[in-house]
Amino acid sequence: MKMSLVDNLVKKIQKEYQLYAPIKQDQELFITRVEDIEEIDYSGKMPLNSWKHLFLPPDEALFDYQHDWQRPSVNYPKLGALNMTVLDLKALGLLDLVFEDDPYYQERRRQILVMGLSVGVPTEQNFQEWKLFSLKLEENILEHLPFDIFLAKNKIGDFKIYAGSEKGQKILEKSSITNYENVKFAGLISEEGLDPKMVELEKAVRNSKDHKLWDELDKICLACGKCSVVCPTCFCFDFEDEPKESSISRKRVWGNCFYPEFTKIAGGQDYTVTVKNKLQFWYEHKFVRIPKEYKVPGCVSCNRCTKVCPVGIDIVENLSRLSRKSNDKSIFTTSRRNSKR
Amino acid sequence: MINPYLPHPVEILNVKQETSDVKLFRLRFLDQKKQKGFYFWHGQFAEVGLAGVGEAPFDICSNSTDSTKYFEVAIRRVGRLTEVLHRLKSGAQLFVRAPLGKGWPATKFLQAKNLLLVGGGCGFVPLKSIIEEVSPDYAKKHQVQVFYGCSDGSQVLFKDRYQAWQKSGINLKIIFDKQKPSKKAINGIVCSYGLITKLFDTEKIVNNASAFLCGPPVMFKFVIRKLKERGFVDENIYVSLERRMYCGIGICQHCAIGDKYVCKDGPVFNYSEIKDIPNIFSFKTLSRV
């Protein structure tokens, strides 16, 4: 299918949904509200910010209190999330699991149309360039990603279209697109079982408490928390009560485990005071707690954290060092040697 | 879909000043049906709060067999929320999400049937519910030894329960670590002076016992060392941990330790499950820079 037909599809989607898509600004891609569909980027590259703002807003009113706790009546906006990469769809799949029983997340989520985009299986070369480590490139990868529509762009710029839900099918048919393939979502975990890289990393991080990497990072990390802000799988939160004119709003707001007092208890005692503690806490969430509970990686290897880190901390290098200790035949050894920083 | 964050209104039935900074609140859900169907397990906790001030976790410390009538939390005044809670009188309304977490193990499934309960400071609070529950019958069949350490005589909690506990065979010993006791006994309970670990040298420790511990981090380290010296195996040691639980359902991450969540997998853990998690009993007090 040609680009012009994709444009038509997007125009149809735009009639029903507020669109968000990667748009280039100052040489960098940012997920932005779309005004002009001509601006939408189809390169398949990773935007610098993550999609979580759409699915889990930085601040969300849970209740309004006047005489009792009432859920604010919200008409969740119909949003179109366009051109989400495979890695971002994996992150979305994780959020869907974590917030499976969360009424706020689920109601908001139902109003969002998700369109994925892939520009093809990364070649050996750009696989290295992207420093991907958790992307399993199985043939049936689409069955394990949540989406309504998926565009697979080939080398000459044509698109193959997949529908992953009834919502997707309907909009495709409204745009008179009939030559799409249906894909049934089969959960995030592939038939072969647990991702072996995830299992290896879990073991490596679990056994890393005495690794000297943590002491080295302790000296350079500023605990600024930027990595957590851009991470598509950082979903921790705080509650805040905010007085309004005639009521009190109890809000869920993004938390950040690098900020002071995240783990503080009554009396002022804190369990993650040192930067080393904070880093271990963050790594444990991604590589130990999430895999243990949800059986999927807590890091989708989008590499955003490395990109925004003001002191150049590289997550792939860190994991490579941690896992080399536990296993000499590390999966990273080659990729690290070949990659240039 | 159930809203896990919805606070339920409760009425304060009674407030009892336990010490200068601890009050015991007896609470009942305004919704009678909710109260009648309310069951908690000893060692579970409640998120207690007020609109505009927020919520914080407190261990439920009453007897769970009274749960359909009322439940109690002991609250120490240490911050903004507890300051406000302490100003409330009986009849006032506050809000609760409960029960949350996993409490003390069921006594009938314990390998070692005797009990050694060790509480330090406010760590004595979560032990109260188990003491209340074992005091009528269980303590007649099995030995129940309780060590309670606190700073001085003014800080002693639940004094008016001591005689009833003693009557049902609970062997309670109190020790002060800041000030020598001004009298030998409080309501019949002998008080001594020293660190809580001293009781392991002065008292005859029950045999074939499971140990339940709660207290400040430093207490865990030294009490566990004493227990190990006395031949307690890790599997027979249970600890209740204090962390800042927000969501109470294992999502928000504030109370994470290693691969676990204190709010969901705890606050009570078997020691063998958590002993390898680094820094579990070490913290720093934040200094204001």
Image (cartoon, coloured by chain):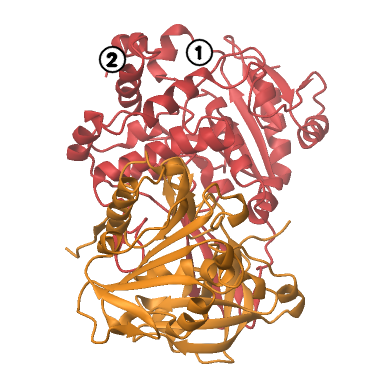
Pick the quarter of the image with the N terminus of chain A. top right
Q: Secondary structure at mark 1?
A: loop
Give the residue number, with chain letter if any, for mark 2: A340
The subunit letter for the residue under badge 2 reads A
| Chain letter of the red region | A
On the rendered structure, is B18 left or right of A94?
left
Pointers 1 and 2 in contact (CB under 8 A)? no
Mark 2: secondary structure: loop
Residue type of the residue flagged with mark 2: Lys
Which residue sits at x=43%, y=85%? B86
Task: Identify the colour of chain B in the image.
Answer: orange
- Counting residues from the start of the chain, the first of labels 1 and 2 encountered is 1
Percent x, y for residue B212? 45, 57
Residue type marked 1: Pro
Along the viewing direction, whichever of B229 and B271 lies nearer the viewer: B229
Name the spot of residue A177 as percent of width and height, x first. Answer: 80, 24
Question: Between A192 and A54, which is closer to the camera in this rendering?
Answer: A192
Neighbour tally class for label 2: few under 14, some 14-19, many 20 plus, Cα within 10 Å: few
Marks 1 and 2 on same chain: yes
Name the subunit of mark 1.
A
- Vertical comparison of B195 with B106: above or below: below
Residue A62 visible = no
Question: Residue B165, position in %: x, y?
Answer: 50, 77
**Mark 1 neighbour class, 10 Å CA radius: few under 14, some 14 to 19, many 20 or more:** some
Separation of disc 1 and disc 2 at Cα? 17 Å
Give the left or right position of residue A61, taking residue B77 as reference. right
Numbered tag placed on residue A122 in the rendering: 1
User: Which residue shows up at 55% across the image and 77% down it?
Assistant: B72
